[in-house]
Image: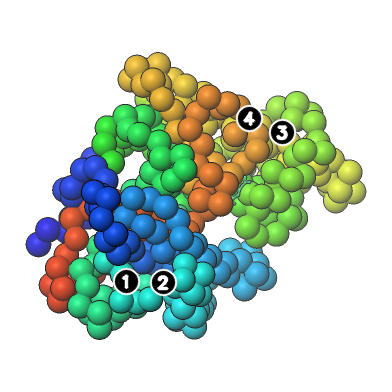
């Protein structure tokens, strides 16, 4: 089978390199890719052209549905994906002004993520590809985040050092070509986005918490509290000690004082996370001699992180959190599976061997 899953520290899709599909001046119909993403709590569909122009990108977030539980409930997510996947695909096609017959391939997230949620997107993609006799391209979600940089108008070119910080992952990646990456470092415990979400919960800011902390931090003093920045060996990260430090501080302050100092706590806590991310990224750049730094994933939307790395290639805000345009983008560099050979392809929950 041509498809491969990224197990171990190096991930290459084995696919083709470079953008293709030039028309040589003749009025060939445009080759469109439909992407689907359902790995967590966003149901997303997008239509892009083969050369990386976004025609539509529809993201239906389930955040409100999960907020009352303080986090994503996997079974609730799967059921909601099932309800939303068809309308979201319809909306993406409608916004793009595209007919099903204009599609060249279907791209879909295969993993890592919530297995039930992934299976909804994968099954929808298989059914659609099969009905249209199209090839299917299963895409790794992390490759998708990196490929958010390959879309127009930015179209960042490898090689670069990439910080991928999301709700599920915190990775430093050596990206040498469009088709994959090598992992240089990762988190030993919580992901950076998870640290934001857990911190927000302790501060009573609801779920998901990254954007809420980002906003509240603008009103607070980032030096009001001295939260620890873990320095583990190598190029790895650790955020669990920071989260515990916030928990103790919140308990120590008590309800009234917490209310009064909430913005200072948010700003100081955020500062510790951002310092850890920026320090490690700069250390990795120095070690590898990387000339270009890029930042992707949900946490890349953070205003303090963006301000701390002004020379980095930053994923556009709307492409930081989960979306399907990035999945369609990655599919251009992954070996497609021809019609009907993909029916047995399975999803994977984690990239750990
Ligand atoms: O990439 P993403 O949408 O999903 C995963 O693949 O995990 O990332 C979601 C994460 C959440 O933890 C969310 O709190 C965080 O990204 N996030 C932020 C911001 N916006 C989203 N974290 C910090 N500041 C933000 N502005
Ligand atoms: Zn993601």
Between 259 and 30, which is closer to the camera in this rendering? 30
**Is tag 1's residue or tag 3's residue first in the polypeptide sequence?**
1
- Residue with the mark numbered 3: 268
Report whether the residue tagged 1 is closer than 8 Å to ligand 2.
Answer: no
**Which residue is rendered at x = 9% and y = 62% of the image?**
1
The picture places residue 346, in percent across and down from the top left corner, at: 23, 69
- Residue name at image x 33 percent, y 50 percent: 51
Residue 48 point in image, percent of width and height = 39, 59
Ligand 2 within 8 Å, label 2 CB: no
Q: Are marks 4 and 3 in contact (CB under 8 Å)?
A: no
Mark seen at residue 307: 4
Q: Is residue 338 or residue 286 the one in the foreground?
A: 338
Measure how far apart labels 2 and 4 are at the Cα level.
38 Å
The label shown at residue 102 is 1
Q: Look at the numbered discs 2 and 1 and tell me whether their residues touch, using CB distance below 8 Å.
A: yes
Reading the chain from its start, which is encountered first: label 2 or label 4? 2
Q: Position of residue 250 (x, y in %)?
A: 75, 44
């Amino acid at each position: 089978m041509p498809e491969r899953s990224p197990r171990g520290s190096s991930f290459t899709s084995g696919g083709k390199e470079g953008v293709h599909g030039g028309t040589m001046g003749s009025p060939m119909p445009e080759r469109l890719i439909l992407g689907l993403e359902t790995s967590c709590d966003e149901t997303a569909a997008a239509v892009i052209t083969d050369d990386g122009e976004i025609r539509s990108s529809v993201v239906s977030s389930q955040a409100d549905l999960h907020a009352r539980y303080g986090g994503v409930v996997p079974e609730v997510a799967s059921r909601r994906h099932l309800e939303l996947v068809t309308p979201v695909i319809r909306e993406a096609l409608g916004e793009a002004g595209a007919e099903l017959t204009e599609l060249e391939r279907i791209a879909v997230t295969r993993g890592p993520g919530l297995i039930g949620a992934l299976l909804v997107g994968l099954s929808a993609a298989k059914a659609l590809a099969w009905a249209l006799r199209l090839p299917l391209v299963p895409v790794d979600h992390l490759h998708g985040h990196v490929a958010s940089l390959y879309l127009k108008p930015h179209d960042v070119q490898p090689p670069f050092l990439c910080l991928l910080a999301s709700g599920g992952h915190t990775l430093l990646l050596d990206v040498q070509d469009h088709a994959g990456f090598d992992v240089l470092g990762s988190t030993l415990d919580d992901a950076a986005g998870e640290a934001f979400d857990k911190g927000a919960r302790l501060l009573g800011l609801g779920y998901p918490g990254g954007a809420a902390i980002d906003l509240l931090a603008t009103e607070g003093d980032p030096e009001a509290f001295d939260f620890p920045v873990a320095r583990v060996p190598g190029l790895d990260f650790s955020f669990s000690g920071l989260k515990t430090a916030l928990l103790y501080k919140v308990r120590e302050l008590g309800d009234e004082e917490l209310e009064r100092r909430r913005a200072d706590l948010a700003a100081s806590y955020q500062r510790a996370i951002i310092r850890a991310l920026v320090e490690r990224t700069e250390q990795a750049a120095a070690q590898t001699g990387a000339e270009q730094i890029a930042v992707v994933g949900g946490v890349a939307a953070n205003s303090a992180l963006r301000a701390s790395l002004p020379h980095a290639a930053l994923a556009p805000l709307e492409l930081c959190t989960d979306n399907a345009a990035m999945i369609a983008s990655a599919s251009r560099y992954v070996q497609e599976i021809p019609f009907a050979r993909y029916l047995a392809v399975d999803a994977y929950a984690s990239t750990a061997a």
